[in-house]
Image (spheres, grey):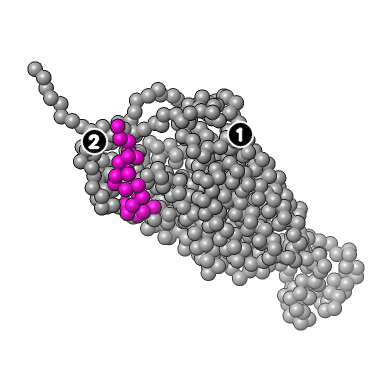
Amino acid sequence: MPTLDDILENVGEFDRFQKQIFFVLCLLSAAFTPVYVGVVFFGFIPEHRCFSPGVAELSQRCGWSPEEQLNHTVPEWGSHGASFGSRCRRYEVDWNATGISCTDPLGSIVGNRSTVPLGPCQDGWVYDSPGTSLVTEFNLVCEDSWKLDLFQSSVNAGFFIGSINIGYIADRFGRKFCLLNTILANVVCGILLVFVPTYLWIVILRFLQGLVSKGCWTAGYILVTEVVGPKYRRTVGILYQTAFSVGLLVFDAIAYAIPHWRWLQLTVTLPSCFFLLYYWCLPESPRWLISQGKNDKAMKIVSHMAKKNRKKMPSHFQDIKFEEEDGRKQSPSLIDLVRTPQMRKNTLILMYNWFTSSVLYQGLIMHMGIAAGNMYLDFLYSALVEFPAAFIIIVTIDRVGRRYPWAAANLVAGAACLVTALIPEDIHWLKVIAACIGRMGITMAFEMVCFVNTELYPTYIRNLGVMVCSSLCDVGGVIVPFIVYRLVEVWHDLPLIVFTVLGLIAGGLVLLLPETKGRVLPETVEDVENFHGQSAPKAKKIYLHVQTSEVAHD
């Protein structure tokens, strides 16, 4: 009997109807960028120092250059460059006192420069930045620098909780319902972020935004892959993620043009209001409708698909009834993920790789944002390398397989982080090249773990397995701001050493997983345990039965 994928072959697997849906959902994928990596621009940390009353007037009277003013009035400046002391401590002297020498101001006040007491920045900070960020508005530096970590961790905590709940809503009430409601909630939270006056409310709204935004992106991913035929499903999924990379380029350009974080937040949020028009231009997933027994509605969408694609529905498909194949029902359980040896190995390795991919991907973006050099250009270069990463995946996964390109991507990412850390700061261009190679490697690893995860679990527990393993991605997102922003205070490139260790271990562990190229998706735990030698199991299908009139017999 024909399956749902069979009818897609007749009405178009990736034709005009599917391309339209793919395009509008790619816009949604690109709009997710400011939520996921927005901390780079919203939380930009400019060079800063304590504000000391009287210094500006003294500098003007003495005719100091900016560098002379810093050398005379900022602790630990000189040959040491910017440090904790120069950014977070100030000389406890009265710069308004009379008789201060212009050649040796500290010596004329206290006699011995080395005995000048240091104190905290009681009068705020001076920031060397033409724009504003969360850091400059709320003084998230020095003793309060951890609050920037919390800002980014809050959105990842929202991802963690929301991905579970939003996934349930998408399965219970439909992809389209989930999509529209999460878009609305994301827009409301994004606009409120522009106007709330306190740091606490910003963190709360950022958490709420995380609660709905990742689920929104995921619902779009599910919908776009459910309306195309099996030959295009994996490519469309990868290209949907590539649209996120396009969003990185657009976000970078907007941030360069608008260096004030509240105006930037408003600018990247308002276009999302147009996504509410999806109510009229997006269909519900016919596969989901079938699973809910709403066969008439599913048939209407299939008929519209055929009309839009300028294809004719075969006559024997005109009156059809969708019915899911009856079979043995199995209830998913968390313990099933670790009950048997191969399942346990798959689960632990996948969880670690989700965690590592998130830490390295977000961590490299954050570290580049606080590195020396032009933040906008560095961000642009690192975003551009995501496109060859997607191309390499599409070319290799069905020729070489999954395991070796995936392992190589992790190993390259880890090695590139080590090389980046060892290159001297004065060769900044070479550091950027090495960091971009690392970014390309971890982008490949991140995209590959998304679909390989689904290929390593049996049908009845596949969704649960992906949900549990990918939750480690959000745990990594919660931790990574503290890894980056705290460790750079010890040594600027110390986070890269941590990334190196994580990446190299991830690459080695991937080699312990079975190759899934050319394999039919497993149906049972036994299929997973015997993966290396199993024969192709019978695929679960959704059958389309031709309705025939019943003839009454006397």
Q: Which of the two labelled residues, at mark 1 and mark 2, occupies the earlier sequence position?
A: 2
Q: What's the residue at 39%, 31% (across, down)? A: 540
- The answer to whether residue 80 is left or right of residue 388 is right
Residue under pointer 1: 348
Element marked by disc 2:
strand
Q: Quadrant of the N terminus?
A: top left
Q: What's the residue at 47%, 63% (across, down)? A: 267
Please name which of the two marks, 1 or 2, marks the residue nearer to the observer.
2
Indicate the position of residue 189 as horizontal and vertical percent values. 46, 52
Q: Is residue 286 above or below residue 532?
A: below
Q: Which residues are magenta?
A: 1-22
Q: How far apart, in angstroms, are the residues tagged by discs 1 and 2?
A: 44 Å
Q: Is residue 117 above or below residue 63?
A: above
Q: What's the residue at 61%, 48% (across, down)? A: 409
Residue 281 or residue 113, whichever sits in front: 281
Q: Which mark is residue 320?
A: 2
Can residue 460 be seen from the camera position used here? no
Indicate the position of residue 404 as horizontal and vertical percent values. 60, 43
Amino acid at pointer 2: Ile
Indicate the position of residue 356 as horizontal and vertical percent values. 62, 44
Is 65 one of the magenta-colored residues?
no
> Which residue reaches farthest left?
554
- The answer to whether residue 527 is left or right of residue 317 is right
Amino acid at pointer 1: Leu
